[in-house]
Amino acid sequence: MKLTGFVAWRPVVAALFLALLPAPALANNLIGLMTRDLGDHRPHGCPSRWCACYLDRMLEQAGFSPLDSYRARDFAGYGKKAKPMTVGAIMVMAHHVGVVAGQCSDGRVKLISGNHGHKVGLGCYSPGKAIAWRLPVR
């Protein structure tokens, strides 16, 4: 049996596996991928305001459809409407975007995002700053 045949099929098998995962599992995968990047700086090829660019890349890696936009505000029309503060949902603000990772001790939204202090980071944001809450889609 040739191993090279399987290697060629690996992306197809991975895509099929991700397509079968329920949305909450994919959301956990997205949060996990972003958590792995905590402390990293701007990815190569992203503009100086890179939160949307980073999120778009992470969505694709996690098995979701990318938006193909580098503007945070554009995510207000992405995916499906979500209830505020839903873990795994995208919190869209006028000039920033990230994924809800939980709730901070003071009740604000715990958001994991790119370009939080010029790196991938966790921050606490007022839910009142959201212009939209969206669920990623495949």
Image (tube, helix red, strand yellow):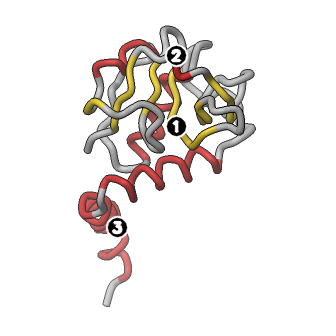
Badge 2 element: helix
Q: Residue furthest top?
A: 94
Name the amino acid type tagged 1: Val
In primary-sequence order, the first of circles 2 and 1 is 1
C-alpha span from label 3 to label 1 = 30 Å
**Residue ID at (56%, 53%):** 32
In primary-sequence order, the first of circles 3 and 2 is 3
Up-down: is 27 above or below 54? below
C-alpha span from label 2 to label 1 = 14 Å
Badge 1 element: strand
Looking at the image, is mark 3 or mark 2 nearer the viewer?
2
Estimate how packed mark 1 is, as few (under 14), some (14 to 19) or many (20 or more) residues with alpha carbons within 10 Å: many
Q: Quadrant of residue 81?
A: top left
Badge 3 element: helix
Estimate how packed mark 3 is, as few (under 14), some (14 to 19) or many (20 or more) residues with alpha carbons within 10 Å: few
Looking at the image, is mark 3 or mark 1 nearer the viewer?
1
Disc 2 target residue? 128
Name the amino acid type tagged 3: Arg
Disc 3 target residue? 10
Q: Position of residue 71 (x, y in %)?
A: 44, 13
Q: Position of residue 96 (x, y in %)?
A: 54, 17
Up-down: is 63 above or below 126? below
Up-down: is 116 above or below 22? above
Name the amino acid type tagged 2: Gly
Disc 1 target residue? 100
Q: Quadrant of residue 104?
A: top right
- Pointer 2 with pointer 1, Cβ within 8 A: no
Q: Quadrant of residue 18?
A: bottom left
